[in-house]
């Protein structure tokens, strides 16, 4: 039987003429239609978080604005808290406990808790880079900005600082130029919370938007008359510039991006941060020395009992128990009623280790200070209080050293879905639970049942241990199917990357190429994906009907995700792909073709008029996607037309909203993909388009 495939898709653009479309249609049997309607590869998440993983270094957090000999944030020596030798002692969580329950005796300052610590292992990539890495980042940013600004980094406006350099993020240092500062601040406060959106690329764009060094919109200088009595039209933009930094920090806090928040704080001087928010982040991140530095200063300036409470905690950490006990008396004389704080502080004064805190659940209160005190006592908050956790506290709890693996895993997975811990960290956490050899051997029995994150860890470990590719695929298929059903395949694919990369392209597993290519593309493993594509293409060229169908299945994904010379585009191939959709209902066929065509055109491909004409008058599946406001849509259009990169990314995030790509209309997706490309964000445009296709069953 002659091969039912186009030489163009098998070989190169210059290959001979293709077979007629009717040949493909004739080879789609009834059983094939039924099987394909079920969607063999529809089972098919951080970016990929898109985060730039900072290198580990030693030493204290270093502000790039101040002397290298001083800890960051820098404060003059005369206002530092009273020194005590105990302050310099570092207490780390001892590793080696199988269940992760080794107690933490944080009776002293912990100098670096910005890196999450799991089972005694520092998990690089989500915490504060120390002196050497930060100095390197400062050098990178300075080198990139000197040509623009003609000044050293230390002289930069703090409003322009960021954790990520422009080379790391792909966003321009001038991305806000031409935009209105006040409007940007308003829009920043409305950024969506992508916990359930299932889009690592949107999480990456939002994270980079908040963390990238960028100059605020330039405003005209104040005139002499303005200095005597400045007008509102000059004062308001200047204030808005200051508020842009505040809005970025507030969003990191609101989103729960604790470790990014801490990294940003380390770049800033005290006058540029909101002290209360900074202290909360330092307490949650175990950065007690910085929290106490700020608290001592604030207590001298304000009579708020909160600062006396924090300072009382600090006195214990400094080894001054008498001062802490005196603070209790003063607070009670002032009429402060906070039994939780008083109980926890007295436990710290007595030097208790791992006390029973279950009774605290009845008080129904939990804040950053009480969380820090519980952690120093070697305990976690009672589970009854977990619903009260702020997003930042949730992220801190995800790597809490006292929690067992079973308790930590669900929290960590939620933080991973929200983009606050990366794939490398999550993979490490999936390896923490201990399983028996029998459990690992029989893991496939529960592969198709959603039994929680612990079962996910079991399947992950079992798949890693499988010696042959077929056994790995037996576990990988149901794992991916569950992720696809939950709308999380783009989030889970980076976790499966090591498993998938262990499966070599071979004819005996070529039937699973659709699943493997999807996972590789979503994991940004382009070279491996192309290798699988070439294998399937070779098999199809030799006359394998199943390989031909598989080739047409993965071709749209490779075409969208990669600008690769081996992935051909032509009218003939498009016609073959259209005919392969006969297994779908007319409505589903039209909906799938419409989405693919608009994405192709947004990526610069020319879809023939004849292809569009076939969709004319065809009703597509009703789209249940959310619609953005006209004002947001208009803002997106204007930002694209005027070349305002930062504003364009901001409006794109707002247009898609918290539901992300899963329910956006083809028109919205097409516009955003076009706009991102025109703004120089080609990689983001393609990654987002790929996520859209996979989320719709491609």
Image (cartoon, helix red, strand yellow):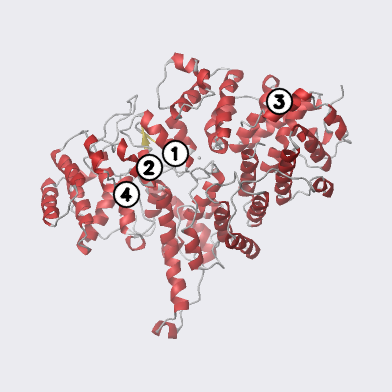
The Cα atoms of the two marked residues, 2 and 1, are separated by 9 Å
CA gap, disc 2 and disc 4: 14 Å
Label 2–label 4 contact, CB within 8 A? no
Residue named by callout 1:
414
Q: Are marks 4 and 3 in contact (CB under 8 Å)?
A: no
Question: What is the CA distance from the residue labelled 2 to the residue labelled 3?
Answer: 43 Å
Mark 1 residue crowding within 10 angstroms, few (<14) / some (14–19) / many (20+): some
In the image, taking residue 439 as reference, residue 557 lies left or right, namely right
CB-based contact (under 8 Å), mark 2 and mark 1: yes
Labels 2, 4: front one: 2
Residue 214, given in percent of the width and then of the height, sits at 50, 60
- Residue matched to label 4: 282
Structural distance between the alpha carbons of marks 4 and 3: 55 Å
Q: Residue at x 63, y 65 (%)?
A: 642
* Image coords of residue 639 (percent x, y): 61, 62
* Dot 4 or dot 3, earlier in sequence: 3
Q: Nearer the viewer, mark 2 or mark 3?
A: 3
**Helix, strand or loop at disc 3?**
helix
Element type at marker 1? Answer: helix
- Looking at the rendering, in which quadrant would you find the C terminus? top right
Position of residue 633 in the picture relative to residue 26 (left or right):
left
Is there CB contact under 8 Å for labels 2 and 3? no
Query: Of the numbered discs in the image, which one, if any, rests on residue 35?
Result: 3
Closest to the observer: 538 or 305?
A: 305
The residue that disc 2 covers is: 394
At mark 4, the secondary structure is: helix
- Dot 4 surroundings within 10 Å: few (below 14), some, or many (20 or more)? many
Label tally: 4
């Amino acid at each position: 039987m002659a091969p039912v495939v186009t030489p163009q898709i098998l070989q190169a653009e210059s290959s001979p003429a293709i077979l007629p479309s009717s040949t493909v249609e004739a080879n789609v049997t009834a059983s094939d239609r039924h099987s394909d309607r079920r969607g063999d590869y529809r089972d098919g998440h951080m970016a990929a978080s898109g985060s730039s993983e900072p290198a580990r270094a030693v030493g204290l957090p270093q502000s790039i604005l101040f002397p290298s000999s001083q800890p960051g944030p820098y404060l003059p020596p005369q206002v530092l808290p009273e020194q005590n030798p105990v302050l310099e002692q570092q207490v780390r969580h001892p590793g080696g406990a199988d269940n992760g329950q080794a107690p933490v005796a944080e009776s002293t300052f912990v100098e670096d808790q910005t890196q999450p610590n799991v089972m005694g292992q520092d998990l690089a990539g989500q915490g504060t880079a120390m002196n050497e890495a930060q100095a390197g980042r400062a050098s990178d940013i300075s080198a990139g900005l000197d040509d623009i600004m003609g000044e050293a980094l230390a002289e930069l406006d703090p409003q322009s600082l960021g954790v990520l350099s422009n080379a790391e993020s792909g966003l321009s240092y001038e991305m806000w130029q031409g935009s209105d500062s006040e409007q940007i601040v308003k829009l920043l406060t409305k950024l969506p919370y992508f916990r359930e959106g299932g889009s690592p690329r949107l999480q990456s764009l939002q994270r980079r938007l908040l963390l990238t060094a960028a100059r605020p919109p330039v405003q005209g200088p104040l005139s002499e008359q303005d200095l005597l009595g400045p007008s509102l039209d000059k004062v308001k933009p200047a204030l808005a510039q200051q508020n842009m930094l505040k809005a970025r920090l507030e969003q990191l806090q609101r989103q729960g991006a604790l470790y990014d928040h801490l990294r940003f704080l380390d770049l800033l001087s005290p006058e540029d941060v909101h002290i209360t928010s900074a202290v909360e982040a330092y307490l949650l991140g175990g950065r007690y020395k910085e929290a106490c530095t700020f608290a001592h200063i604030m207590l001298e300036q304000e009579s708020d009992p909160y600062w006396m409470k924090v300072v009382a905690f600090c006195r214990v950490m400094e080894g001054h128990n008498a001062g802490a006990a005196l603070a209790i008396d003063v607070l009670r004389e002032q009429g402060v009623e906070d039994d939780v704080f008083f109980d926890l502080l007295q436990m710290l004064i007595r030097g208790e280790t791992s006390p029973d805190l279950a009774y605290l659940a009845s008080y129904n209160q939990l804040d950053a200070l009480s969380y820090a005190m519980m952690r120093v006592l070697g305990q976690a908050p009672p589970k009854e209080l977990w619903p009260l956790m702020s997003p930042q506290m949730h992220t801190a709890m995800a790597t809490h050293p006292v929690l067992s693996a079973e308790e930590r895993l669900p929290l960590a997975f939620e933080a991973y879905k929200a983009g606050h811990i990366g794939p490398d960290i999550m993979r490490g956490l999936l390896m923490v639970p201990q399983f028996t050899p029998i459990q690992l051997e029989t893991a496939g029995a529960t592969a198709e049942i959603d039994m929680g994150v612990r079962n996910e860890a079991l399947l992950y470990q079992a798949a890693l241990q499988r010696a042959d590719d077929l056994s790995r695929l037996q576990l990988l298929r149901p794992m991916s199917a569950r992720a696809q059903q939950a709308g999380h395949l783009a989030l889970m694919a980076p976790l499966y990357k090591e498993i998938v990369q262990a499966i070599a392209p071979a004819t005996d597993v070529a039937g699973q190429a659709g699943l493997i290519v999807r996972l590789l593309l979503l994991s940004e493993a382009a070279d491996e994906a192309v290798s699988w594509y070439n294998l399937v293409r070779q098999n199809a060229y030799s006359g394998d009907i199943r390989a031909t169908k598989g080739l047409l299945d993965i071709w749209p994904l490779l075409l969208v995700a990669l600008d690769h010379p081996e992935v051909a585009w032509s009218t003939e191939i498009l016609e073959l792909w259209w005919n392969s959709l006969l297994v779908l209902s007319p409505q589903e066929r039209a909906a799938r073709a419409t989405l693919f065509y608009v994405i192709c055109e947004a990526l610069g491909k020319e879809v023939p008029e004849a292809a569009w004409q076939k969709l004319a008058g065809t009703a597509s599946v009703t789209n249940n996607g959310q619609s953005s406001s006209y004002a947001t849509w208009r803002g997106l259009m204007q930002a694209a037309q005027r070349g305002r990169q930062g504003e364009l990314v901001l409006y794109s995030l707002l247009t898609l909203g918290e539901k992300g790509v899963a329910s956006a209309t083809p028109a919205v997706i097409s516009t955003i993909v076009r706009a991102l490309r025109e703004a120089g964000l080609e990689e983001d445009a393609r990654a987002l388009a790929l996520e859209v296709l996979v989320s719709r069953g491609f």
